[in-house]
Image (cartoon, rainbow, N blue to C red):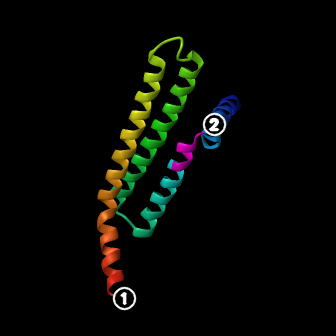
Amino acid sequence: MKNEIKKFLKSLGHAIDGLSYALAHEKNFRIEIVVAILVISFIFIFRVKSWEAIVLILMIMWVLIAELINTVLERVVDILKPRIHPYAHLIKDLMAGAVLISSVVAVVVGIIIFYPYFRELIEVLKTF
C-alpha cells in the first residue's frame, strides 16, 4: 500500500511539473488560465445554475486540455523538424486550429449562459 501511495505521489508530481512547464512557457495557456479564473469568478458572482456552472467548467477544461495537447504535439513535431517531413508545419497548424475551435465554442457557450445575467445586471444598474 505504501508503494502505491509513493507511485501515485510521484505521478502527481510529474503532472504538476507538466502544468508548471505550461504556465512558465506557454503564453496562450496563461491567458486561458486567466480567462478561466474570470469565468469561475462570474459563476460565483452571478450564482449561475448548477448545470450552467458544470457546462462552463467543462468548457474551461476542454480548452485547457486542447492547449496542453497542442503543446505536446508541437514539441514532438519540433523534435522531427520541418525538414524531415513536409507535414510537420501542417500538424502544428491543424492542432492550433483545434484549439481555436474549442476556444470559440467555449466563448459562444459562455455568452449564451452569461447573457441573461449581464442583461439583468444592466437593468438593475439602470434603475440607479
- The relative height of residue 81 versus residue 65 in the rendered view (above or below) is above
Question: Whole-percent x and y of residue 115?
Answer: 31, 64
Residue 43 position, x and y percent, is 42, 62
Q: Residue furthest bottom?
A: 128
* Residue occupied by mark 1: 128
Q: Main secondary structure of the magenta part?
A: helix
In terms of image quadrants, where is residue 94? top left
Query: Magenta stretch containing residue 30, yes or no?
Result: yes
The disc at residue 12 is 2
Cα separation, mark 1 vs mark 2, equals 51 Å
Q: Nearer the viewer, mark 1 or mark 2?
A: 1
x and y, in percent, of residue 61 in the image: 45, 44
Quarter of the image containing the C terminus? Answer: bottom left
Residue drawn 45% across and 58% down? 39
Magenta range: 26-31
Q: Residue at left 36%, top 81%?
A: 125
Q: Which quarter of the rendering shows the N terminus? A: top right
Within 10 angstroms of label 1, few (less than 14), some, or many (20 or more) residues? few
Residue 9 horizontal/vertical position (percent): 67, 36
Q: Amino acid at mark 2?
A: Leu
Going by the image, does 95 lie left or right of 1? left
- Amino acid type at image mark 1: Phe
Q: Which mark is residue 43?
A: none
Q: Is residue 120 above or below residue 94?
A: below
Mark 2 nearby-residue class (10 Å; few <14, some 14–19, many ≥20): few
Q: Taking 115 as reference, is 6 above or below it?
A: above
Of the numbered discs 1 and 2, the one sitting upstream in the chain is: 2
| Residues under numbered marks 1 and 2 in contact, where contact means CB atoms less than 8 Å apart | no
| Nearer to me, 44 or 107 | 107
Considering the numbered disc 2 on the image, is that residue within a helix, a strand or a loop?
helix
